[in-house]
Image: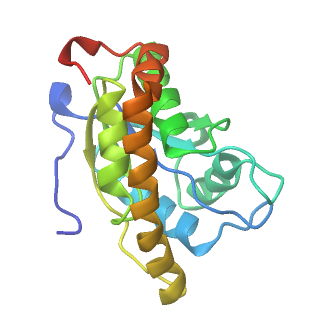
Amino acid sequence: MRGEGPRDRGAGAPGAVVVLGAEVRGPDDPAPAARRRVAHGVEVLRRFASARLVLTGGVGEAGVAEAVVMAGLARRLGVAAEQIVLEQESTSTLEQAVAVARLARRHGWRQVVVVTDRYHLPRALFLFRRMGLAASGDPARGPGGADRWRWLAGAAREGGAWAKVVGQALNGTLRRAAAAAGADLAGGG
């Protein structure tokens, strides 16, 4: 349920709330999915006083990094600039998982909460965990202002994205990515 979930309890609290990138239309113009994800990420962040808000997403068609545009929105929603960490190179969920795993190791975050759309969350969590992160998820509620057909198209796109993940697992891409992220691969796969 919305608003429920773990609270800041010291050692068990996440070091970061990670909001996965989504389309932006230009500087200071996040598309509905980005607005929905950031708003929910800020809501989750408020449960954890010591956590950082990690905003992910590189430069797409709009010519500006998704993370930068999303940071502007997060600041307008009351998040202090020093609480925000930007990851502005990634252009895929796998790249986001690798980059956040590196950030987590650098900052000593033992746990992260991943915020994305409900349809995207299972694949995102699979990849984040594959990169060695203790990751839980808290889905942004949708369509939340997005055109319903566009949201459904995103959900349908996940089938193809899962097929890509299977291919990456079979051809060794996931293993190489996990090694690049510094993941302990003792668990196999």
x 49%, y 38%: residue: 94
40, above or below 173, in the image: below
Res 122 visible: yes
Q: Residue furthest right?
A: 63
Q: Quadrant of residue 126?
A: top left
Q: Is residue 104 left or right of residue 2?
A: right
Quadrant of image for the N terminus: bottom left
Q: Quadrant of residue 111?
A: top left
Q: Is residue 133 left or right of residue 147?
A: left
Of residue 108 and residue 137, the one placed in the foreground of this image is 137
Of residue 17 and residue 157, the one placed in the foreground of this image is 157
x 56%, y 55%: residue: 74
178, above or below 81, in the image: above
x 46%, y 47%: residue: 164
Q: Residue furthest bottom?
A: 148
Residue 70 image position (x, y, % from top left): 62, 55
Residue 44 image position (x, y, % from top left): 33, 54
x 62%, y 38%: residue: 90
Quadrant of image for the C terminus: top left
24, above or below 122, in the image: below
Number of dots carrying numbers: 0
Residue 7 image position (x, y, % from top left): 18, 46
